[in-house]
Amino acid sequence: MQKIYADDVEITVLLLTIISKNENGELKYQRTAKTRGKSGIFPARRRHLPSAPAPKRRSTPQRRVVHLDLKGAPPTISYLERLLPLLRGAGATSLLVEYEDMFPYEGELRPASAANAYTPAQVRHLLDLAAQAGLEVVPLVQTFGHLEHVLKLPDFARLREDEESPESVCPSKAESLRLVKAMVDQVVATHAGHRAFSGLVHVGCDEVFHLASCRQCQSRLRRLGNVGRGNNGSGNNRTFTKIRLFLEHVKSVAQHVRTAHNATALVWDDMLRGASAEELQESGIGQLVEPVIWDYGERVGSLGAQVWKKYASVFGRHLWAASAFKGAFGEHLLLPVAGRHLLNNRAWTELMWREGRAGTASSNGRHRAGFRGLVLTGWSRYDHFAVLCELLPASVPSLLLNLISVSHPNSERERERAWREVMSCKDGKTFADFVALAQSDEEGEGKGRGGHAASAAAAAAFDRAANRCDFPGRDVHDLALRTDSVRSAVRRLLSEEGGGSSGVGRGGRAGGWLTEYNVRRNFTSVWRVREMAAAARATVEDLRKLQAGAKQVLEEVFDQHTVRTLTCFYLLPCCVVLYLFLKLTGMSTLPICAALYAECVLPTFILRLFRRAGRK
């Protein structure tokens, strides 16, 4: 109760009346004002009083699609057998399976399959598991960009758009279209007829960085610049014709998907953003593909109102959105930044409600975008040549948190129920508890995981809490958490930051006493160097313990090839740095991680260092 003095009355009293609860269980009040005058209490005239903020409205996507990016680190089928029912329990309706070089191609395409690719029987088993879990499958086949796994091969190098870069095919070569059609045919043939097949085929087509850079495409650009109206209305022939080259190739692939397989093609949308509505409409692309609009930032919708209006006018209500639950904030992260992904997914459900609450056109004639579903992407590596990041088993807590959030955006009760069903946490932490931890990840200060201005301590707290829960891949999550700790210790050892006020201990400042200046002049503090060497030896011991159990943990989820790749990517670099550091200080000549360098392909000079150490 609050007193407010008015001009025409003695006292005005603000009365709060509980009228309802919102979806988070919070009380909603109606504010009314009454005044006490000489004649008693009577209604006062309406006053502009501040109202409680209305809860944000969010849409539940009709389809919630989980992206399984198999390239580089395909999980075993036995692991997927445990994971897929949990995804369904958390609200997933479909899987977007990106095979890349993990699909068992045959014939002339056989070299495009990796040595550890799934067998045909394993692909069918995956489809069976999806069907049993009640999940549809959308296969993804790259047909324009991100074709490194094919174009790196000598037999297909002639089809590159850029001779030095095997990223994308040249759309002006007839062989390019034959190649991608053959890839689509083999993948779809394995899925068609299976009860798990969704009738959708994602044909990629994102990030075609070298579009129209070869001589043959340049020649077509000059010809197409003189066809029809000749430009895009702004006098820029090149922009119009590059888009036209792109659209013609995509249309050919999408038409093949429809006529040969009676399926609908999905495409990533980024290459369409630069096209005008007129170019898209004239091409007829709106009748052949359904674009998947991807944005992994915390505030989606930055594309601008004109993009939404353009897409709505061309594709109507046949749009998809794409968020992320991992693989978006750093090429070499071991664990997702759950807080940033949660903000991203929530922002998408808010935008989908705003854009999709009306029909294709609103009452005032404004086109509104309609969304058929949301794809939660989980990238395993940024491209074929990049290192692995954020392994799927280690990312399950982030996946389940975000999947439940978008599946039940307006019901706290349903979110908590789903969380209890899929995550068994020993300390009884609820969905709301984990949301609080994830959101605190965005409120800290300093440089956190993923290069974001977030609290690294809060990010670690989220993962430590998740580590006390039971879920498929929990041991891999624990391994990633410990590996991340060791890598952080190595970085602190060589950094100018960390180590506390004294600059010593586990975070010793090599940047302060072992700079190039100190080494060249043999000028430093022996005491400081000994402290740093002690910290290095302690980190070496942590690394040895980590290595001892890593292989056994990883082999429960991945094949031997992937296990070797992971240890070489993440553990060996720490070994090399620590060995060189100890060698520099003159405190140790003991070999470090000898078993690792025997399995990994290393530069010759590194091998010599390890072998020399092994003889001492």
Image (cartoon, rainbow, N blue to C red):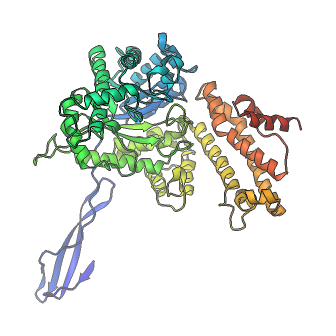
Answer with left or right where residue 261 lies relative to residue 614.
left
Answer with left or right where residue 433 lies relative to residue 560.
left
Residue 187 image-quadrant placement: top left
Q: Is residue 266 visible?
A: yes
How many numbered marks have been drawn onto this rendered protein structure? 0
Residue 201 in percent (x, y) is at 34, 24
Answer with left or right where residue 324 lies relative to residue 499.
left
Q: Is residue 285 above or below residue 274?
A: above
If the image is split into quadrants, where does the N terminus sit? Answer: bottom left
Outermost residue to the right: 616
Q: Residue at x 31, y 26 (%)?
A: 220
Name the residue nearer the viewer: 585 or 168. 168
Residue 291 image-quadrant placement: top left
Q: Is residue 34 above or below residue 8?
A: above
Q: Is residue 174 above or below residue 474?
A: above
Residue 213 in percent (x, y) is at 40, 32
